[in-house]
Amino acid sequence: MYKKDQLEGIVNLASRAYQFDRFHTDSALPPGAADQIHAEWLRNSCEGGAADVVITATRDKEVLGFVTVKIDCEMERFSGVRLATIVLVATAEAARGMGIGKAMTKFTLRRLADRQVRGVRVGTQLRNIPAGRLYESCGFRLIGSGLTFRKLL
């Protein structure tokens, strides 16, 4: 689980962990903007604005990875069913291939089950093959896909 002394390590990891996401492929964003977006998104997540749960993996106080989760409060309020979304997952480059992402994701799923969450969804970009493999290895199954359109004015 996230601890306040991990904040800068998490933000630093977030600013360099992504390459297949929608921001890095957006030609309308200036260089470096995507990394800054992720850094601020994680800072906000750790401070409780963009996530309800932040799970971390560390070694000797070094942040090796994180998972952020948002609980769907409206669905619970209207239907009585508690659902959640895994919003962001990242593993430090030096720690990739060691099973840390899978371990964090499975740990997160167990914690959510303990909190009576009945379903969890996660999304990724079609071109992010490593993420897709991670989620499938954790028991997720593809249920749909989508397209994003934009017109610059």
Image: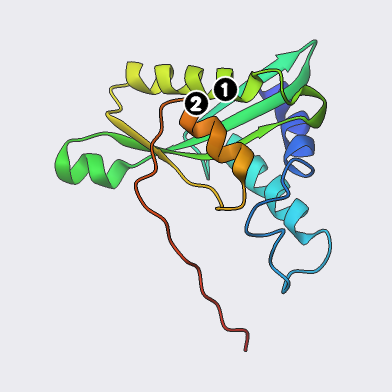
Along the viewing direction, whichever of 107 and 42 lies nearer the viewer:
107
- In the figure, residue 92 lies in which quadrant? top right
Q: Which mark is residue 55?
A: none
Q: Is residue 22 above or below residue 13?
A: below
Q: Nearer the viewer, residue 5 or 20?
A: 20
Towards the viewer: 32 or 134: 134
Q: Secondary structure at mark 2?
A: helix
Q: Report the Cα–Cα distance between label 1 and label 2.
A: 8 Å
Q: Amino acid at mark 2?
A: Ser
Secondary element type, mark 1 = helix
Q: Position of residue 47 (x, y in %)?
A: 59, 37
Residue at image coords 61%, 43%: 129
Q: Which residue is mark 1?
A: 102
Picture residue at 69% right of the left edge, 49% below the top: 38
- Amino acid type, label 1: Lys
Q: Does residue 24 show up? A: yes
Residue 63 lies, in percent from the top left, at 74, 23
Q: Are marks 1 and 2 in contact (CB under 8 Å)?
A: yes
Q: Which residue is mark 2?
A: 137
Please tell me which of labels 1 and 2 falls first in the chain: 1
Left or right: residue 70 versus residue 8 is: left
Q: Position of residue 148 (x, y in %)?
A: 50, 68
In the image, is residue 128 above or below residue 116? below
